[in-house]
Amino acid sequence: MKILTQTPTQLTIQTSSAPDGLLLISPFIVIGLWQIILASNWIGGGIFMLFSLSLLDGAIDETYIFDKTFSKMTIKRRAVWLHDVTEYPTRKISAVELEEIGDSDRNRIY
């Protein structure tokens, strides 16, 4: 997770699973295209392409927006076939812990 914006009244945090998902599926896309274009193997290439799309569907970007002004938390989920927005009142949120981990390059992960 990384912090996108932080003001006195609003905090926006985003997960970064979509870029990781693209790295995961890129070899399958290359192999699938190679099968279709160079080997004229439509069935094998199609299987690789469908498999890569199913992996990409699992890569969901989530954005959490905590707003003090309106006393609500908004969760936005986005993927290939998903676009979902959910709102919760902040009074229902309790016992939340945010852990910060730093690495040798001074990058912070929450």
Image (spheres, rainbow, N blue to C red):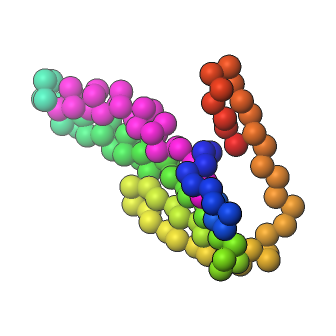
> In the image, 66: left or right of 52?
right
Query: Is 36 left, or right, of 16 in this rendering?
Result: left
> In the rendered view of the protein, which quadrant contains the C terminus?
top right
The N terminus - image quarter: top right
Q: How many marks?
A: 0
- Residues shaded magenta: 12-36
From the top left corner, tell me how far across and down residue 19 is, in percent.
45, 39
Which residue is at 67% across, 37% downward? 109
Asked if one can make out residue 41 in the rendered structure from this viewpoint, the answer is yes
Q: Classify residue 65 as left or right of residue 93.
A: left
* Residue 50 percent location from the top left of the image: 33, 44
- State the residue in front, 100 or 87: 100
> In the rendered view, would you say 48 is above or below 97?
above
Residue 64 place in picture, x, y as percent: 61, 61
Q: Residue furthest top?
A: 104
**Depicted 18 relative to depicted 5: above or below:** above
Residue 40 or residue 110, whichever sits in front:
110
State the image quarter where residue 40 is shown: top left
Residue lying farthest front? 8
